[in-house]
Image (cartoon, helix red, strand yellow):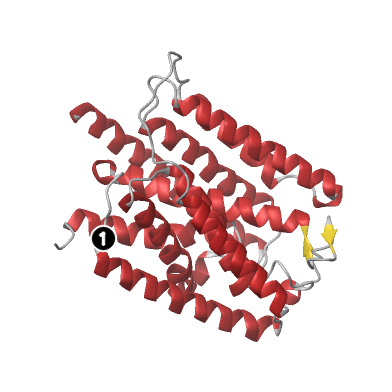
């Protein structure tokens, strides 16, 4: 069965939104490098589509998608860019592995945990949630058939291979066989664990979920905490990020079981995360463009994110009114 046109638009949207959130809204890449989407969209968007389609097709929800997002982190940062193991990633002398370094594994605890946060909660989580809110009628349904999934998988592999080639040309670095094998095995284990999570139940407690504005504010504050945890704290920074992650997951689990929890609450969480990226970008040192060019890019992408959040809220409210 051919997917309806609306679902095709949803697929294209997620294919593009994921790299735009991951690299442009965060402030890593400027407007003038939008052409990089040719490689970034298959690698990020393809991964987001595979995660979302796999979870929705099997009747699972956000716990499974987040676990698959963690598996994606190991693929993207452990096997493709290999930033988890590279002591001089991008040849910028950033010393990313130095904070909380684990010599037996050749990784930095702070950088590794930060990458798990960025890819799991933002690159995959925020992107998927935004696009699902943009198409609320199909938020929990698969958007593609088996053939479509296979095409997306092929695109993802090709995009990842292209990203690896570009990264190798720039870094001239390949992790050790043990590190690559470890990343691959752990990624597979996370994928298996994702499907050991029980399917969703419609259980609701007697409590009342807080306003979506409150859930959004909580997500924004906790997200800022993760993004601004100083690496110089070393293991204290790792502990702080783990504590923030735990608080976020516990609160979301608790609130989502309360009466009144809806798609607007998920959008609130998503908006908080998106604004974290958009605002944090203004404090980051430009990696490629000049300061003025980068700040213009930051402004454009933050404004676009705000417009998209507003559009999503309108569509969710309209859909809830008709339901």
Residue 15: % across, % down: 38, 62
Q: Nearer the viewer, residue 177 or 39?
A: 177
Number of marks in the rendered image? 1
For mark 1, does the 10 Å Cα neighbourhood hold few (<14), some (14 to 19), or many (20 or more) residues? Answer: many
Secondary structure under tag 1 reads loop
Q: Is residue 293 visible?
A: no
Q: Is residue 104 left or right of residue 265?
A: right
In the orientation shown, which residue stands out farthest toward the top? Answer: 206
Q: Nearer the viewer, residue 15 or 282?
A: 15
Residue displayed at 35% across by 41% down: 312
Q: Is residue 163 visible?
A: yes
Quadrant where the image shows the N terminus: bottom left
Q: Is residue 241 above or below residue 87?
A: above
Residue 181: % across, % down: 65, 73
Snapshot quadrant of residue 236: top right
Residue displayed at 71% across by 82% down: 173
Q: Is residue 23 above or below residue 150?
A: above
Quadrant where the image shows the C terminus: top left
Residue 279: % across, % down: 60, 45
Q: Nearer the viewer, residue 149 or 305?
A: 149
Residue 311: % across, % down: 34, 41
Q: Is residue 95 left or right of residue 315?
A: right
Q: Nearer the viewer, residue 279 or 56?
A: 56
Residue displayed at 73% across by 70% down: 85
Snapshot quadrant of residue 9: bottom left
Residue displayed at 44% across by 50% down: 304
Question: What residue is disc 1 on?
Answer: 144
């Amino acid at each position: 069965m051919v997917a309806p046109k609306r679902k095709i638009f949803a697929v294209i949207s997620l294919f593009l939104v994921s790299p735009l959130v991951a690299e442009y809204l965060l402030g890593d890449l400027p407007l003038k490098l939008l052409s990089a989407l040719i490689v970034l969209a298959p690698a990020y968007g393809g991964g987001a589509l595979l995660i979302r389609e796999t979870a929705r097709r099997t009747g699972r929800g956000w716990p499974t998608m987040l676990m698959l997002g963690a598996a994606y982190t190991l693929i993207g940062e452990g096997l493709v860019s290999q930033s988890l193991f590279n002591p001089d990633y991008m040849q910028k002398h950033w010393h990313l592995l130095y904070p909380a370094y684990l010599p037996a594994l050749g990784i930095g605890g702070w950088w590794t945990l930060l990458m798990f946060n960025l890819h799991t909660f933002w690159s995959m989580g925020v992107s998927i949630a935004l696009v699902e809110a943009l198409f609320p009628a199909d938020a929990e349904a698969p958007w593609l058939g088996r053939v479509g999934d296979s095409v997306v998988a092929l695109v993802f592999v090709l995009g990842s291979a292209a990203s690896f080639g570009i990264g190798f040309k720039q870094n001239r670095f390949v992790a050790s066989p043990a590190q690559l094998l470890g990343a691959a095995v752990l990624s597979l284990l996370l994928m298996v664990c994702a499907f050991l999570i029980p399917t969703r139940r419609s259980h609701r407690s007697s409590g009342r979920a807080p306003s979506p504005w409150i859930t959004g504010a909580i997500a924004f504050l906790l997200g800022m905490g993760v993004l601004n945890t100083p690496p110089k704290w070393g293991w204290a920074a790792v502990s702080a990020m783990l504590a923030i992650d735990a608080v976020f997951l516990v609160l979301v689990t608790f609130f989502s079981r309360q009466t009144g929890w809806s798609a607007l609450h998920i959008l609130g969480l998503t908006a908080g995360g998106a604004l974290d990226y958009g605002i944090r970008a203004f404090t980051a040192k430009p990696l490629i463009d000049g300061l003025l060019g980068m700040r213009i890019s930051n402004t454009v992408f933050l404004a676009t994110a705000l417009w998209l959040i507003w559009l999503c809220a309108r569509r969710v409210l309209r859909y809830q009114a008709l339901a």
